[in-house]
Image (cartoon, rainbow, N blue to C red):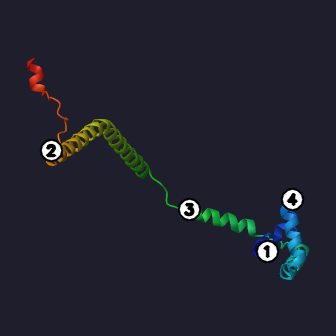
Amino acid sequence: MNCKAVQSRLSAFLDRELIGEELFELRAHLSNCDDCAAEETALRQLKQMLGGMSAPEPSPDLADRLCANVLKTRVEQPRFTLRTTVFSFASVAACSALATFVFFSLRSEAPAVLPAAKAESQDVAFDIQRDQAYSMGLDATNGANVMSVANYAGR
């Protein structure tokens, strides 16, 4: 363990919250490192001093002051009228309806658009490959007879 890790766990060590290997590593580090051992001693003394102090008693009028502040805060908050409540509900309902409409309209169009775009891109790619083969003087059919759809329909 390094000094930073030990110093971050000193409070847990003093409160007996560490167990297992972590506890053994921390104890070993404290026995070898004078700086961390001094930090542990100082923190132990501070905890003992604070533990020996008594808690201050609240003033007798604390409950009355707290209630007054809570009531004051409640009175100062704006009240919602029926008009603002209805307007808020209508706004949320309209936005929700619009979002639903947009979602379903985009969702219904998506399947129709994607296959057409895919088929079109495949046609374009085929046309480009065919044109490149012909421009280089290659025969894309490897000398086979080509039958067009028009010729096939006539048979």
Q: Mark 1 points at which residue?
A: 7
Q: Which of marks 3 and 2 is nearer the N terminus?
A: 3
Q: Earlier in the sequence, mark 2 or mark 1?
A: 1
* Secondary structure beneath label 3: helix
Q: Residue 81 carries which label?
A: none
**From what the image shows, is residue 57 above or below residue 129?**
below
The crowding category of the residue bearing disc 2, from other C-alpha atoms within 10 Å (few below 14, some 14 to 19, many at least 20), is few
* Secondary structure beneath label 1: helix
Label 1 near label 2: C-beta < 8 Å? no
CA–CA distance in space, label 4 to label 1: 18 Å
Q: Earlier in the sequence, mark 2 or mark 4?
A: 4
Residue mark closest to the camera, 4 vs 1: 4
CA–CA distance in space, label 4 to label 3: 55 Å
The crowding category of the residue bearing disc 4, from other C-alpha atoms within 10 Å (few below 14, some 14 to 19, many at least 20), is few
Label 3 near label 4: C-beta < 8 Å? no
Quarter occupied by the N terminus: bottom right
Q: Earlier in the sequence, mark 4 or mark 1?
A: 1
Q: Mark 2 points at which residue?
A: 134
Identify which amino acid the numbered label 2 is placed on.
Tyr
Q: Mark 3 points at which residue?
A: 75
